[in-house]
Amino acid sequence: MKFEDYPVAASPPQGINPCDGCALRRLDAFLPASDEELKTIQSFRTGIRRVEAGGSIVDEHRPSPQLFTLYAGWAFRYKTLSDGRRQILSFLLPGDFIGLQDEFAEGQTHGVEAVTDASLCAFSRDRLWPLFHAQPKLGYDITWLAAREEKMVDDNLVTTGRRNAGERVAMLLMHLYRRADRVGMVRDGWVEFPFNQQHIADALGLSLVHTNKTLRRLQRLGLYKLDAGWLRILEPHALETLGDYFERPLRPTPLI
C-alpha cells in the first residue's frame, strides 16, 4: 500500500469553496458543520502547506503566524532539552489542530515535525478572535480540541510515570492503531507505521535498548506484526489488557 491509497487525497482541496470538498468531513470521526460554519472556516483558511518527511511544521520557541489542521500524513509534537534530548508529547493524525499554544506564550512551547510527507490546511492566527466572535460554536470546538489534547497529555503522563516498558509499548501501539482506524487509515487490518525505535523511545521515556527488547518480546508473543513500515495488531484484546488500555467510545470530533 502507498500513501495515496488512503481515503483522503494527499492534498486538501482548493478553489472557491474548498471546505465543501474536504474528504475528512465525510468521515464519521468528525462532526458535521453547518453551511455558515463552513463559510467562516473558509474565511479563516489562508491556503495549504506541504511538508516533506522530517520537515518542521512548527519551530519550537519561535512564534508562528499560522495555525494548521493536519489533512494527510503523520506528525508529532515534541520538546527538547538544552543538550538535545527530546520528549515526544503526542503523535498527530489527520484532523488534528496544530499551533494554538502560541496564543499563551512568547513563541511555541513545543515543536511539530512531520514523520511522513504531510499536507495541512493553514489558517491565519490574526483571524482567530474574529472567528470566535462570528461563530461562538467554532470557538467552543477549538476549546474542545485543546481539552482533548490535554487529556492525551494526561494519558501520556500516566504511561511514562506508572506503566512498565511492556505496558508502555502495548499502550502506544493500541492508541495509535485505534486513532488511525477512526480516520480511515487502516486497510485490511494494516496501518502505515512510519515510526522508528527512536520515535517510540522518545515518546515513552525509554532507552533505545529497552525499547528494542520490549518490541521484540511483544512481537515474539504474537501480539503484533511489523512489515516494511506497516503495523498489524494480531491480538488486540491481549495488547489492551497488557497496556491497561480501555478507550471509551469517542464522540465525533470537531474539524476546523
Image: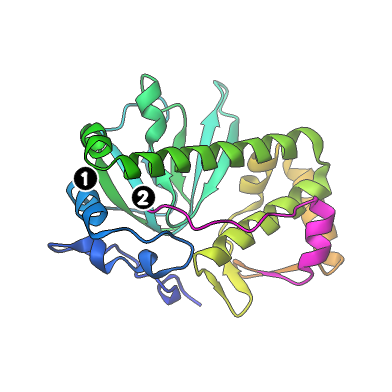
Residue 174 in the image: state x and y as whole percent: 69, 58
Q: Which residue is mark 2?
A: 69
**Helix or strand or loop: what does disc 1 sit on?**
helix
Q: Quadrant of residue 180?
A: bottom right
Q: Position of residue 158 (x, y in %)?
A: 73, 36
- Which residue corresponds to the image point at 32% horizontal and 58% vertical from the top-left? 33
Mark identifier at residue 44: 1
Question: Which residue corresponds to the image point at 73% horizontal and 51% vertical from the top-left?
Answer: 171
Q: Amino acid at mark 2?
A: Thr
Q: Does 243 lie within the magenta span?
A: yes
Residue occupying image coordinates x 62% and y 53%: 196
Q: Is residue 115 left or right of residue 201?
A: left
- Where residue 41 appears, x then y in whole percent? 25, 50
**Disc 2 versus disc 1: distance between alpha carbons?**
12 Å
Is residue 58 shown left or right of residue 44? right
Residue in front for this viewpoint, 208 or 72: 72
Amino acid carrying mark 1 in the image: Phe
Q: Is residue 216 visible?
A: no
> Disc 2 vs disc 1: Cβ atoms closer than 8 Å?
no
**Colour setting:** rainbow
Of the image marks 2 and 1, the number of the one nearer the N terminus? 1
Please tell me how crowded label 2 is: few (under 14), some (14-19), or many (20+) other residues with Cα within 10 Å: many
What segment is highlighted magenta in the picture? 232-256
Residue 223 picture location, percent across and down? 80, 66
Regarding mark 2 in the picture, which secondary structure is present there? strand
Q: Is residue 123 left or right of residue 226?
A: left
Which of 237/10 is in front? Answer: 237
| Quarter assignment of residue 250 | bottom right
Q: Is residue 48 magenta?
A: no
